[in-house]
Image: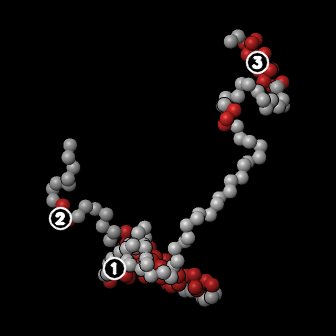
Amino acid sequence: MTPQSEDEVWRQIVASFNDTAERDSADQPWPDSENVPPEPTRRVVKPSEEPLPDEDSDEDSEEGEGEEGHFEPPPPPPLPKLDLPTKLAWVALFGGPAYLLVAAMASWHMDGWALFTAVAAFIGGFVALVVRMGDGPPNDSGWDDGAIL
């Protein structure tokens, strides 16, 4: 395109910016069968002729027959028992900020050592839990970690 024809095309685009498109245009990119009707048709759902099964009936009381699609998961395994250092780390992690929050809301006078102890408990509990996470490989993995090339 030459610069003059580009300018002309640009002027045509700007001039036709507020024009509305014709609804019955023949150059639409989809077939007429895909046009949405102005008023959507309403569909009527008729109830089925079959009677609903009675919940009190004894016919389906056998196990498995009436509950064909029902799944009940097995109970979860019990939570692992925590050792004493882990329990203390959790208490310190939440206990330090909890003490500071309660003391601030109750307007208690806090000495410097109490503030230091609460903050140190929070930081110490966090560090203890991170160190005890054990993110490394298991101890019994040996020299071969299972990678195959």
Specify few, some or many for label 2: CA neighbours under 10 Å numbering under 14, 14-19, or 20 or more: few
Q: Position of residue 67 (x, y in %)?
A: 42, 72
Left/right placement of residue 41 relative to residue 64 reads: right
Q: Which residue is mark 2?
A: 140
Q: Please tell me which of labels 1 and 2 falls first in the chain.
A: 1
Query: Which residue is nearer to you in this view: 131 or 52?
Result: 52
Pick the quarter of the image with the C terminus. top left
- Provide residue 143's location: percent of width, then percent of height: 15, 56
Q: Nearer the viewer, mark 1 or mark 2?
A: 1
Distance from the alpha carbon under mark 3 to that under mark 2: 75 Å
Q: Is residue 17 above or below residue 54?
A: above
Q: Which mark is residue 54?
A: none
Tell me the element at label 3. helix
- Mark toward the start of the polypeptide (3 vs 1): 3
Nearer the observer, 83 or 40: 40
The amino acid beneath tag 1 is Pro
From the image, tell me which residue sits under label 1: 78
Q: Quadrant of residue 65?
A: bottom left
Q: Secondary structure at mark 2?
A: helix
